[in-house]
Image (tube, rainbow, N blue to C red):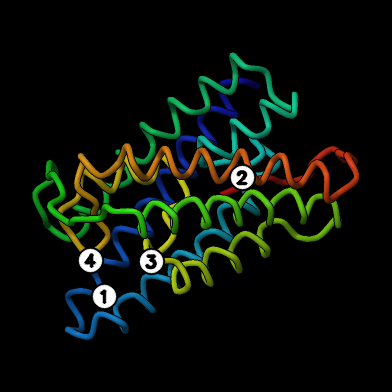
């Protein structure tokens, strides 16, 4: 059972990253219009999230994201040991997803991004993106709404209203540092993103506990 959960998290994260990076490569190759390329990247990511969360939720909860796993570990809905293993396979799956995207488009497999993403605005954006993601998940669970749809809707919107285009995922940020394409981020910029993502997620966890009157229903699906 544990092996199945770990496989689901690795595969789900890998496919998510492949969708993010692959659609970015495709869009960048088809148009010189950055806004149009971002729109294509956004649509592909949102669609992938709905599918991946829906099919993998019964197997592992469909976290695909270390901050989501951390939040549910703090809620005592996943053990610390299993949470740690989830985070490891999420990161490994994300890296594999980048390599698969490169292979599909005939690019060098091993790359390092040169795309600069740093500064206070980017960090605030990542904190906001992660805050909203966790609030969307916990709020959807509280409302017994479709978590997959809520997450996909929020990330689709956050691609456009955040300065960072809403990574909101340390495993994805790490993976994207290994692609020098449309979706990349320089390795030296990743720690700032991860720190902001953790802060935003923890703030959302605290606020959700108050907003939803401390009621913590058992989640049917969790994601990102």
| Closer mark to the observer between disc 2 and disc 3 | 3
The picture places residue 16, in percent across and down from the top left corner, at 44, 52
Is the C-beta separation of discs 4 and 3 under 8 Å? no
Question: Cα distance, mark 2 to mark 1?
Answer: 27 Å
What mark, if any, has residue 25 been given in the picture? 4
Query: Circle 2 sits on which residue?
Result: 56
Q: Which of marks 2 and 3 is nearer the N terminus?
A: 2
Query: Circle 3 sits on which residue?
Result: 163
Q: In this view, does 196 lie to the left or right of 135?
A: left
Q: Which of marks 4 and 2 is nearer the N terminus?
A: 4
Residue located at (63% from left, 43% from top): 203
| Disc 1, SS | helix
Q: Is residue 214 left or right of residue 64?
A: right
Residue located at (11% from left, 55% from top): 107
| Disc 3, SS | loop
Q: Is residue 198 left or right of residue 38?
A: right
Residue located at (61% from left, 47% from top): 223
| Disc 4, SS | helix
Label 3, residues with CA under 10 Å away: few <14, some 14-19, many ≥20: some
The picture places residue 14, in percent across and down from the top left corner, at 40, 44
The picture places residue 43, in percent across and down from the top left corner, at 45, 74
| Closer mark to the observer between disc 4 and disc 3 | 3
């Amino acid at each position: 059972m544990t092996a199945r959960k770990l496989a689901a998290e690795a595969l789900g994260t890998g496919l998510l990253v492949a969708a993010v990076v692959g659609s970015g490569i495709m869009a960048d190759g088809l148009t010189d219009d950055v806004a149009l390329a971002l729109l294509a990247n956004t649509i592909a990511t949102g669609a992938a999230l709905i599918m991946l969360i829906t099919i993998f939720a019964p197997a592992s909860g469909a976290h695909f994201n270390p901050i989501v796993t951390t939040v549910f570990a703090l809620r005592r809905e996943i053990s610390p040991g299993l949470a740690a293993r989830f985070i490891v396979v999420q990161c490994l799956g994300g890296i594999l997803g980048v390599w698969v995207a490169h292979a599909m488009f005939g690019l060098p497999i091993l790359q390092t991004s040169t795309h600069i993403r740093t500064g206070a605005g980017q960090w605030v954006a990542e904190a906001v993106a992660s805050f909203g993601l966790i609030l969307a998940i916990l709020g959807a669970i509280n409302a017994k709404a479709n978590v997959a749809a809520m997450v996909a809707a929020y990330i689709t919107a956050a691609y456009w209203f955040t300065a960072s285009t809403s990574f909101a995922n340390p495993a994805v940020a790490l993976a994207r540092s290994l692609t020098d394409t449309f979706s990349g981020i320089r390795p030296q910029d990743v720690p700032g993103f991860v720190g902001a993502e953790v802060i935003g997620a923890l703030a959302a966890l605290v606020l959700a506990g108050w907003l939803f009157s401390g009621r913590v229903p058992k989640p049917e699906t969790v994601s990102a």
